Image (cartoon, grey):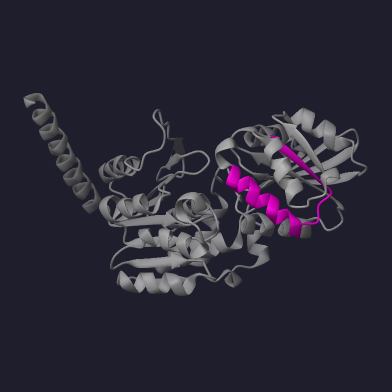
Amino acid sequence: MIGLFIGLFFLIAFGIYEFETNKYSRKKIPNVIHVNGTRGKSSVTRLIAAGLRAGGKKTLAKTTGSAPALIFESGSEKPIIRHHGANIKEQIKIMKFAAHRKPEFLVLECMAVTPEYQWVTEHEMVKSNIGVITNSRLDHLDVMGPGLRNVTLSLCNTIPSHGKLFTSEKKMLPLLKKQAKRRHTEIFQAQDIEISNQEMKKFPYIEHKENVALALSICQHFDIPKKIALQGMYQVQPDVGAMEIYDCERENKKFYFVHAFAANDPESTEFVIDSVKKLYPHIESVVLVLSTRADRMFRSKQLIQMMKNIDFTHLYLIGEQTTSIQLFARKHKLDQEKITDCGWINGNELVQKIVKLDSEETLILGIGNIGGNGGQIVSYFRERDRKRKK
């Protein structure tokens, strides 16, 4: 019994020490920007940090996306190795590390998903003065749902108290405004119409205009001119999950593979598909490659339901539990002649199947999940991208 009390005492003492240490670290950092939202968190985190650096601000950043990374003041980065999985206490370690380097800005991507952890991360750990909610989409409904209002309210848990909030969200903006007012926080909505298509073409990868507009609005808030901030953003190293297009060839046939696995909610995925089809209006053969994961079955089913609105030539199911997804597609009246269950497959085997389609040029869109089979397919096309070989 005595040992139990001693252990409890040390546990409480350690908790108090950790809490006080984090308070000290936070006081050493003038500006903490906490980036939350359904889509684009990693990209927006990188863009904000790049724009601030270009404006002469000493800035550290940390992403938690497809490949978590710590981004230094120079723009160089170091991957974060997690030996015991993701844990929101990681943010405390990052803040302690940042405090020793004395940056003007620390840009943190939110790594919490559940509403409770989002609140704890912001109000007990990060305590940002600048909050960011990129957008609100129907995703992670198992923990944030069941509807869009619930998702939005969950994201609102990271709105800072007596601070400023920046967002690109349009549909749920009234709810964001209401929640920001409750926290005595001023809200700013970024307008993507202020970014020209010509400015967007200078990015070496496919970036979303609303992400750039959002990052720019924050940089301009800190008196960094648009032109200077954009020059910094053009140099940014994209997240592993960033959308790219790989130009490949096989048996005298051309393939344009679109890495869109990061846009894995229905609304974002449909937007990406429509956008890419407009970039290649002459290509009639549009192939979808849906990467499935056993722990993300609800996401795959959402995308199957979305496909009723999409005009596509063929759908290849890859990854885990593809048979279940094909049965789900049959139940929702998708044309079974347009669906191939590939199971776990490598890039070479997938292309062998696609080559059999009667088309000289094919637009291939990888959607669903970057983890698992999806990542392998991306690596295959990236290694064969003709642009990279030049």
Q: Residue at x 40, y 28 (%)?
A: 83
Observer-nearest residue: 360 or 97? Answer: 360
Q: Residue at x 54, y 65 (%)?
A: 213
Q: Residue at x 60, y 40 (%)?
A: 370
Magenta extent: 297-318
**Residue 225, percent from left and from top:** 48, 67
Query: Along the horizontal axis of the image, is 303 left or right of 86?
Result: right
Q: Residue furthest left?
A: 2
In this figure, what is the number of numbered marks?
Answer: 0
Q: Quadrant of residue 193?
A: bottom right
Residue 308: in magenta span: yes
**Looking at the image, is 237 positioned above or below residue 193?**
above
Residue 180: in magenta span: no
**Looking at the image, is 168 positioned above or below residue 370?**
below
Q: Is any atom of residue 240 visible in this view? A: no
Q: Residue at x 59, y 47 (%)?
A: 298
**Residue 10, percent from left and from top:** 13, 32
Position of the C terminus, as image quadrant, is top right
Position of the N terminus, as image quadrant, is top left
Observer-nearest residue: 349 or 251? Answer: 349
**Looking at the image, is 320 positioned above or below residue 91?**
above
**Residue 69, percent from left and from top:** 45, 39
Query: Along the horizontal axis of the image, is 314 left or right of 319?
Result: right
**Residue 152, percent from left and from top:** 46, 63
**Looking at the image, is 36 positioned above or below residue 373?**
below
Q: Is any atom of residue 287 visible in this view? A: yes
